[in-house]
Image (cartoon, coloured by chain):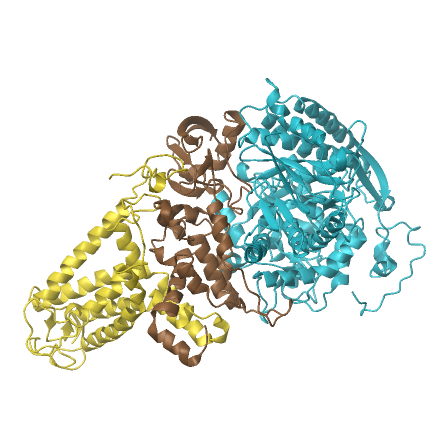
Chain colours: A cyan, B brown, C yellow
Amino acid sequence: MTDLERHAYDVLVIGAGGSGLRAAIEAREAGLRVAIVCKSLFGKAHTVMAEGGIAASMGNSNPHDNWQVHFGDTMRGGKFLNNPRMAELHAKEAPRRVWELETYGALFDRTPEGKISQRNFGGHEYARLAHVGDRTGLELIRTLQQKIVSLQQEDEREFGDAEARLKVFMELTITELMHDGGAPDGPVSGAFGYWRESGRFVLFDAPAVVLATGGIGKSFKVTSNSWEYTGDGHALALRAGAKLINMEFVQFHPTGMVWPPSVKGILVTESVRGDGGVLRNSEGKRFMFEYVPEVFRGQYATTEEEADGWYEDPEHNKRPPELLPRDEVARAINSEVKEGRGSEHGGVFLDVSTRLPADEIKRRLPSMHHQFLELADVDITAQPMEVGPTCHYVMGGIEVDPDTGASSVPGLFAVGEVTGGMHGSNRLGGNSLGDLLVFGQRTGAGAAAYAAAASKDRPTVIDASIDAVTATAEEPFQREGGESPYTLHQELQQVMNDLVGIIRREPEMQEALDKLADIRERAAHLSVEGRRQFNPGWHLALDLRNMLQVSECVARSALERQESRGGHTREDFPGMDAKWRSVNLACHLDPATGMVQLTRQQVPTIRDDLMHLFERSELEKYFTTEELADFQDVRQGEDDQS
Amino acid sequence: MTYDGHFRVWRGDDGGELVDYTVEVNEGEVVLDIIHRLQATQTPDLAVRWNCKAGKCGSCSAEINGHPRLMCMTRMSIFEEADTITVTPMRTFPVIRDLVTDVSYNYEKARQIPAFEPPADLEPGEYRMAQVDVGRSQEFRKCIECFLCQDVCHVIRDHEDNKAAYAGPRFFIRAAELAMHPLDARNDRATFARDQQGVGLCNITKCCTEVCPENITITDNAIIPMKERVVDRHYDPLVWLGNKIRRREH
Amino acid sequence: MTQDLAQGVNARGRAKIGARTLRTDRWWLAPVLTVTGLTLWVIYAVVRASMQSDYFVPAYHYLSPFSSPCLSDSCVAGSSLFGTPFGAWPPLIPFAILTLPFLLLFRLSCYYYRKAYYRSYWQSPPACAVAEPHKKYTGETRAPLILQNAHRYFWYAAVIISLINTWDAVEAFHGKGGGIGFGLGTLIMVVNVVLLWGYTLGCHSCRNITAGRLTHFSRHPIRYGLWQQVSRLNAHHMGFAWATLASLVVTDLYIALVAGGAFSDFRFFN
């Protein structure tokens, strides 16, 4: 092992997006030594792509807002499949986490009174999203990045070494987690990876590992996600013995660019609709009025006049149906296109130009204006955009303890998109940035507490484990004449897109599983040219293994769940089935064969006080009669303390 | 609308060379699409940084026909079909391999700027700032850290020896952002810009503004205001006197 | 142009591309135009300011900006609006010797002109991403360039001079044989003065002085309002810089031709 670089830390955070950075800050402020590892440069994480805002019930725009309302919206959005404790913590703590960002130097857009301005978003009852134009994610990542730098400056003053307690390892990929003493079911003891630049192998010894690797979008062809989103954390956790839940729920954002082909999938922020953008089909019809589902009847406008009135006077008008949760809008667009009422390039029209003056559009949606002008020659202040669904977010992920972010594997923690439960079957826009901050803080604290306790008797990494993972990483170079990882990746994306996409059918998913098995077989024989130094082909070959494992979890879970709910739509089971509401599908690897397996488990029950935030009449749409047998419609006091 | 385009791409490390390729080009594509097609079909080990492919993350900085640009925002339609398009790494930073450069200079400079200092008398949630007061700093916070402004700045591009003393446009806008932040508790931002960041080395020739993919008015809205604040602080006896008399900072 | 390969854009560790630039467009055009324009203008200004003739049209009180204010006994009768505190003037020395140096320094230290001449005359850099020919570079950190920091003091002077020019323009509403009149010369002088104000008030130092140096616009609404107006002008500072060079030449040339008798002023009224 002459080529191995070794580092020892208390907490290793894998991923430098919003959740990873927030967790690292918390663990470092607890006094521990923390390493952050990321595949890209520091500050480039996918969080920068988040546009709309951070949902937090600060009540700046509407004083009626509070955590209970936010909790209710989150549960409705997730169709009551959410882990209720996570939704509760999120709703309660998001405002504090947002205010904290201001102490790090963040500059949100302001209300006339000088408070943080909040905007409307799909599924949120009140204007709730703290935002900075349409580049909120960039603000979040930059703020956290600069907070990290300030902590490093403290260490520079105290120890003369900026990286004494917090170091960022940029452009480094983790390929495997290590277990104490090499026991596959033991606590984690660190992680193994390689420098993308040199190909040199690196081992981190750490009693606590936080996975903050984001999502899996790169398994799909049309996606708003970047190359980094290869499901690394999902797969690392699977191989380390943890469980993934809710993997069938993949969010297709209703509005991605559809033209030109090279930008297909790039996100068009929901703020366009929040700020007045309307969806029309090729006949010029505002079709969303036709697609308000039964459970949301009564909450959304039924006429254009009422919908238009809402932007000015939300107290006396109902919300426009363009602001339904994302799954509803994505399905509606999909149907319109399928029934021949789509645009030339297979999308529908999203128009904000008729609703706002040009200057206002440029001020509120500057990056959208820029993006369309530069990439599609479309001036959104004068023309409609062509949009269609794009794979955006995975609701499913590692099952964790809501309060600490701990997974079922001792020492392994997870936070952000890589976790499952918080968003149930469908995430509301604006809830992901809140998720990163709230659970970033909690998981950082959880991992720090665990690592501090483990510091006396640190888990170890044995040489045999290192040899094994090194061999796995080098395998693609040992073979000759195999297929290119690029070819296999393209095939995988096509399979997932076509067969396990936005609308699913049993025979197609069966076919997908067969094809995945075939690709997995061929991937075991692929070969890579060149050397380990900055070799994208090799990097993809290693990432491909993760994508395949995760894709199989998605396909198996999707096949198993015989109903439609949130980010999972079955053509053969179009309705939502209350019997499925209480079921989580958990995916894990069979320790003997290493193959993906599914088990059913109970969704955590909702505490009584939380249940009573809803009316019985609403709960009846989601719950079985037996589940509601003891439920009495007694509203709790409004002064319920948080 | 498909044609075979001619490309010259830098291959190798500092001793590498420009290599000619013929690659398929389709309607609506950007230079980054071509680089990806090269990877997938001819040169699987071509090193390139990229992430979002939407001009939001600032990873795919390079020089295209000598112009510092984001590859994902450079549409092929701006070229003629017969043109040979030369793609090189940024020439101000050491090259690692192919189109990937070592941009650690920027991270070192970022770490030297004193962080935002929160006001001592306000708790989280009590911050009140007017939109007109945060607007200026918000412009600078649009920065996606593509480092094209750093790449094009002749102060370091043409003079390696200035790197130690010079922070570059990206960090002048950071300095300006903090100097104009309504609640930043430090009042030595201008002095820092002069003494530690070398803002005096800048001769405001505006190339940073020209290349900024976010259209940040770097020179007029950040560098010149910082230079003027330096004058306020260090070169203008009248302002100095005024501040002495009124005993206050702006 | 000789380039040391171990230096600058080919310094150690960087991609050894060798070429000074890989730009394929006409990047040299802008510096060539700048040098040509500025050099021609300076030649014209030096010649005209030192000619000491054809700078005043007594009938309509047209006074050339290159000779304003005219403060010596040598000035043509009627051209000295502010008296003649100085005696006879030696030849070749411009009558406006008290103001011209400040105007020159105002423009020399102007943030726009700095860019223009650093790029074109000094080639530092000649164009973006084109290597400059110099080995050493110290920017504006040392004498004499550190004096660029005095820009605002030259701006103060420029404001006073612009007021004088404004007065000159008001005087130009002079009719034949007294009373109010209005001719093409008047119009040219007014346009020139408007452009001069556009340039002077759009100055970056002025922007700093109005409110740029404040941290809280919201606490100084009047100054903020001024700053917004100045910023609007400032966005076109380059345009004003060139437009005023042109308008100064046009104003002076027109007056010279009328004063020299090449043609007579076109009168709209009296």
User: Total of numbered circles in the picture?
Assistant: 0
Instruction: Answer whether residue A530 is visible to the viewer in this image.
Output: yes
Check the image and report above or below for A575 versus A32.
above
Residue A254, image x, y percentages: 65, 46
In this orientation, which residue lies closer to the viewer: B120 or A392? B120
Residue A384, image x, y percentages: 55, 49
Figure quadrant of the C terminus of chain C: bottom left
Figure quadrant of the N terminus of chain C: top left
Residue lying at 47% horizontally and 48% vertically, measured from the top left: B106
In this orientation, which residue lies closer to the viewer: C160 or B185? B185
Relative to C189, B5 lies left or right: right
Instruction: Answer whether residue C188 is visible to the viewer in this image.
Output: no
In this orientation, which residue lies closer to the viewer: C77 or A461? A461
Relative to A380, A553 lies left or right: right
Q: Quadrant of residue C8?
A: top left
Residue A320, image x, y percentages: 67, 57
Q: Quadrant of residue A640?
A: bottom right
Check the image and report above or below for A159 versus A537.
below
Residue A351, image x, y percentages: 57, 51
In this orientation, which residue lies closer to the viewer: A183 or C207? A183
